[in-house]
Amino acid sequence: MILVQRVARVLLPPVILAGLALAAWLTGLIWFAQTIPREEGWADRATDAIVVLTGGSDRIATGVQLLSEGLGRTLFVSGVHQGVELREMLRASRLEPSTLECCIVLGYQAGDTVGNAAETAAWMRSRHYSSLRLVTSNYHMRRSLLEFSIALPEADVVPHPVAPNAVRLADWWRWPGTLALIVNEYNKYLFALARYTLRG
């Protein structure tokens, strides 16, 4: 009995701490999932640039549409694979090359969201732009905004979330693919937030 009590005294504190940490993580996950934008687009005011982060369906098509509506002077696509040409990228997105080609710039340096933010920051500063409309998937928007606030704190960033059809946000915990996507994105957001906090 004494041995059991001693073992309990040793093990109980870390078990309690682990339980509290898990509860905090789950609470944060629910908050993260429930606050993912359900609708596409937000403010309709124009910005200097429209920035599209590659990697999700319909992002490029959305960016081109926004450019055609005059909501930005230039469309910058960050994270394009090496060797991909503008016309090829437009066709892959089921878009016909148009007169807007002159106003579209491709960035080839970024390989992840941190790289997207750094690549865009360098390009924005080279153009002396001070505002941008950020186009990315809705589940990716919160982390993207955080990374952009780190890399480009002086810019005015207007979020423009795109809602992929394959991501089922209604009862998201019931769909294994959506659940795995949100958990992965939430964990990445936590790591980014920790890095941002340590910087301060």
Image (cartoon, grey):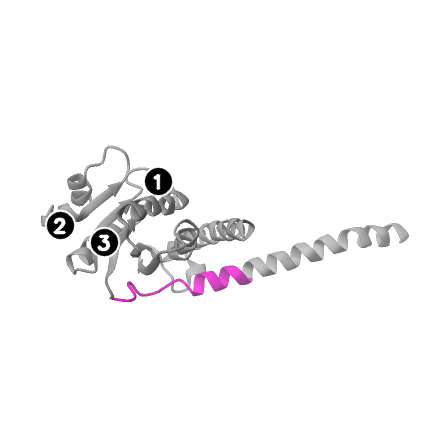
The residue lying at 28 percent from left, 63 percent from top is 41
* Left or right: 194 in relation to 111: right
Judged from this view, the residue extending furthest toward the left is: 99
The local crowd at label 2, few if under 14, some if 14 to 19, many if 20 or more residues have their Cα within 10 Å, is: few
Sort mark 1 into few (<14), some (14-19) or many (20+) by Cα contacts within 10 Å: some
Q: Write down the residue under mark 3.
A: 63
Amino acid carrying label 2: it is Leu
Q: Mark 2 points at which residue?
A: 100
> In which image quadrant can residue 149 be found?
bottom left
> Could you say which is closer to the camera, residue 141 or residue 157?
157
Q: Tell me the element at label 2.
A: helix
Residue type indicated by callout 1: Ala
Q: Which mark is residue 79?
A: none
Report x, y in % for residue 20: 65, 59
Q: Please tell me which residue is depicted at 36% across the width and 59% down the height of the picture.
A: 168
The residue pinned by badge 1 equals 110
Q: Distance between the residues labelled 3 and 2?
A: 11 Å
The one nearer the camera, 78 or 179, is 78
x, y (%) of residue 194? Answer: 54, 51
Q: Give the range drawn in magenta.
A: 27-44
User: Of tags 3 and 2, which is closer to the observer?
Assistant: 2
